[in-house]
Amino acid sequence: MKRVALFLDRPYVDAHYCFTELARHFAEGGYLVDLYHIENPFNPPPAFYDTRIRLFRFPQSVWQKADFWIRHLLKQDRRYDAVVGTPVMGAILANRVARLRRIPMIYLADEVFDPEVNDHALKNIHQLKRIDRKINARAWCTIALGEERFRYQKEVNRLPNDHTCFVIPNAPPGAADHLQSHFYRDMFGLDDKPIVLLVGTLQWSLAKKIFEATRSFRDKPYHMVLQGRSKGSLLFQDHPFIKLSTMPLPSYLLNYAISSADLGLVLYDQSIPKEVVNAPTGGKIGAYLKNKLPLIAGNVDDFRRFETEGVGVFWDGEEDIDAVIQRALGRRQMLAQNIPEFYEKNYNYSRFFQPLLNQLNEIV
């Protein structure tokens, strides 16, 4: 069988569909998959339950790098037919393996490495940026999480006009479906009032705003739950209204948990460049829509399309959030009916992955 290596220098692989579904779809497409990721105590390791997918620690120390190259050079099961890498260190390793073996390299742009926008604590950041541009340009193709994201990637990395790109959303596969679930009701002992869910962290500006604004909430016709991505993603403090879950959810449990809610919050601030860049490709969008949860989305301009398409309501970040939630609750059945068609057209991972697999199979 053909083999592919995914060099993902990230600790939160299990929390993002752009990583987990890439591995699963390669395996389902006939490849043996070796996934290299960073291990840490705050994020659960990926859980695949598929013997075609193996997990390895991403080499960081001198000894780990030496061990990687010894095994790669001497062991037959480390000879790959294609490699995938994330910026920056994952792409650097993938590029070296690809050039040594003369195999295709895929640049997975899960984020745009832009020193002018993102806060990076890397040494020699501008030198790394020059290396990143060269590697991206040499890659057989780039996977971008959205059309706008690729246009931004192309500008920042100065990619040629003929550079091949596959847009594959950061979303689950399959049709949108709402599972029968009482996950959060059972966890917190909630009654049958609707649940408004925020998956993520408090690092985003509007999430912090809601966190503070709802401290005065008491008897509302809905509950609010904040689901952290990792053990370290939430402040351990009491909140009189919002229920805080700091239990990391493995990817296989995510749909069941989200389906126990009724509305999904997507919060990015139009006034913060980093949030504007990340907003359209946030994994929570696909996760909510996959489970037929109408969106409350704010306040990035791109999110107005969710209200235009009839799958959510737009929040400008200034209107009283209680009024916005109650407006969404009043329309949720109609909004939920529009989600399956919208999701299939814009987010179903399987439909977007297949063209990449077809073209890769032609050259390996």
Image: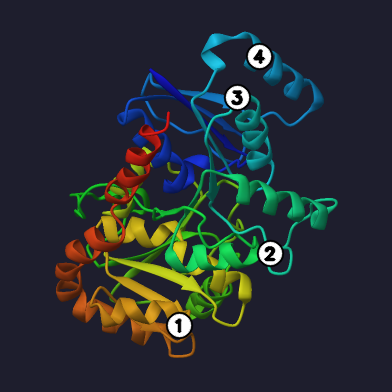
Image position, residue 360 (x, y; %):
40, 37
Q: Amino acid at mark 4?
A: Leu
Work out how far the residue at label 4 is from the one at label 2, CA to CA, in angstroms: 36 Å
Q: Earlier in the sequence, mark 2 or mark 3?
A: 3
Q: Amino acid at mark 1?
A: Asp
Query: Left of 26 or right of it: where is 14?
Result: right
Work out how far the residue at label 2 is from the one at label 3, CA to CA, in angstroms: 33 Å
Q: Nearer the viewer, residue 356 or 110?
A: 356
Camera-nearest label, 1 or 4: 4
Q: Earlier in the sequence, mark 1 or mark 2?
A: 2
Q: Amino acid at mark 2?
A: Asn
Q: CB of mark 4 within 8 Å of CB of mark 3?
A: no
Tag of residue 254 = none
Q: Earlier in the sequence, mark 1 or mark 4?
A: 4
Q: Within the image, what quadrant is residue 22 found in?
A: top left
- The scheme the figure's colours follow is rainbow
Say few, some or many: other residues with alpha carbon within 10 Å of mark 1 (under 14 / 14 to 19 / 20 or more): some
Q: Residue at x 54, y 81 (%)?
A: 270
Q: Which residue is mark 4?
A: 73
Q: Which residue is mark 3?
A: 101
| Secondary structure of residue under mark 2 | loop
Q: CB of mark 2 within 8 Å of CB of mark 3?
A: no
Work out how far the residue at label 1 is from the one at label 3, CA to CA, in angstroms: 44 Å
Image position, residue 350 (x, y; %):
29, 46
Query: Left of 188 or right of it: where is 301?
Result: right
- Image height check: is 211 above or below 177? below
| Secondary structure of residue under mark 4 | helix
Q: Residue at x 38, y 41 (%)?
A: 21
Res 32 seen here: yes
